[in-house]
Image: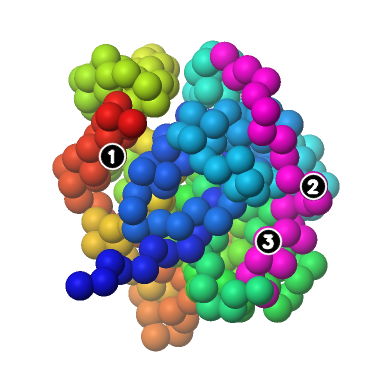
Amino acid sequence: MSRPRRRPVIIDCDPGVDDAIALLLAFASPELDVRGVTTVAGNVSLEQATRNAGHVLDLVGAPAALPLVAGLAGPVSGAVRIPDEPMHGVGGLGGLPVPDGPRRPTAGNAVDWLAERALAEPGVLTLLAIGPLSNVAALLDRHPQAGPALREIVVMGGAAHAQGNVTPAAEFNFHADPEAAHRVLTSGAAVRVVGLDVTRAALFPGAAAERLAALPGAAGVAGALLCGFVARYQERYGVAAVPVHDALAVAAVTHPGLLGWEAGEAGVECAGELTRGALVADLRRPERSRDVEIALRVDADAFTALLTERLAGYAGR
C-alpha cells in the first residue's frame, strides 16, 4: 500500500516560544511537507523572529536550502507596532541563546515569495499563519490571485467566545494587526481559525514539560522552552500549565479531528477604543458563509499526548 501524500505547507510565524514548539511539531509530523518558513514582527521584532526561526530550523536539522524569508516589520496599516510579548522571555525564546549559525534568510520578501509559491501550485499549499496576519493581508492585497490559489489559510488567533490575552476583548496576534486580521477573515479565502477558545482549553502540563526537559537533543530544548513558558504562565495566571497556541494550529492541519469546528461569518474590530482586535464571529447562520471555520472544541488529552510523543521523538535522532 502506498503511503499517503504529505500535505505541503508554508509556516508564517513570529517565534516566540509557542511558534518554536509549533515548528518543532511540524518538522516531526510525517503528515506535513514544510516547503518554507516566513517571518513577521509580533512576539519579537522581525529581525529577531527571523533569527529565532533560523535557529529552530538548525535545531531540527531542516535542509540548508529550505527557504526562510523575512516579511513585514509592522502592521499593514502603518500603526505603531505593539511591544514584544513578555510571556516569551528575553529574545523571544525564553532567554535561550540564539547563536549565529550558517543559515541566512532567503533573498527577497515574504509577501512576493508567498505569492510566487501559491501561484506555482494552485490549490496545493496550505498557509499556516501563526503570527500577526500582516504578511497574509499584504499577500491578498498585492497579489489578488494568490489567495484563491491557496488550498486554505489556517490561522492561530482571536477569541470568539473566550476572553482575550492582551485586552479582555483581543488575542495577541489579532491585536497586533487588527486591520490585517480583518482583511484575511473577510477575504473570501478558505480560512480556519484556531483561537483562545480551544488553546486555553488544551493546557500543556508543567510535569510533561519537565519530562521532556530531561531528554537529550532537541527534545530537551523543547522541554526547557516549555518549562520556562509554564513558569511565566503560572506567575501570571496561577496555573502550572500553559496553552501552546501555535502548536495546536499545526495539529489542526495534521489531525483536524482533534478540534470541533463551526462555520459562519467573521471579522475583526479595528476602531473600537476598548475592543480593537476583537474577533467578532456570527456562527448562527452558517449557510450565509462557509468561508470561515472557527475551532470551538478540542480533545485536550489527545493533543497533549500528540505533542508529547512527537517532541520526545527528537531524543532518538
The tag earlier along the polypeptide, 1 or 2, is 2
| Left or right: 63 in relation to 49 | left
| Residue 187 x, y percent position in the rendering | 62, 73
Q: Which residue is mark 3?
A: 114
Answer whether residue 105 is magenta in the image: yes
- In the picture of the structure, the residue carrying the numbered disc 1 is 310
Of residues 89 and 308, the one nearer the viewer is 308
Measure how far apart labels 2 and 3 are at the Cα level. Answer: 13 Å
Q: CA distance from mark 3 to mark 1?
A: 28 Å
- Closer to the chain start, of discs 2 and 3, is 2
Which residue is at 54% across, 36% downward?
57
Label 2 secondary element: loop
Q: Quadrant of the C terminus?
A: top left
Q: Please, is residue 305 above or below residue 278 in the view?
A: above
Q: Is residue 182 above or below residue 133?
A: below
Q: Which residue position is annotated with label 2?
A: 107
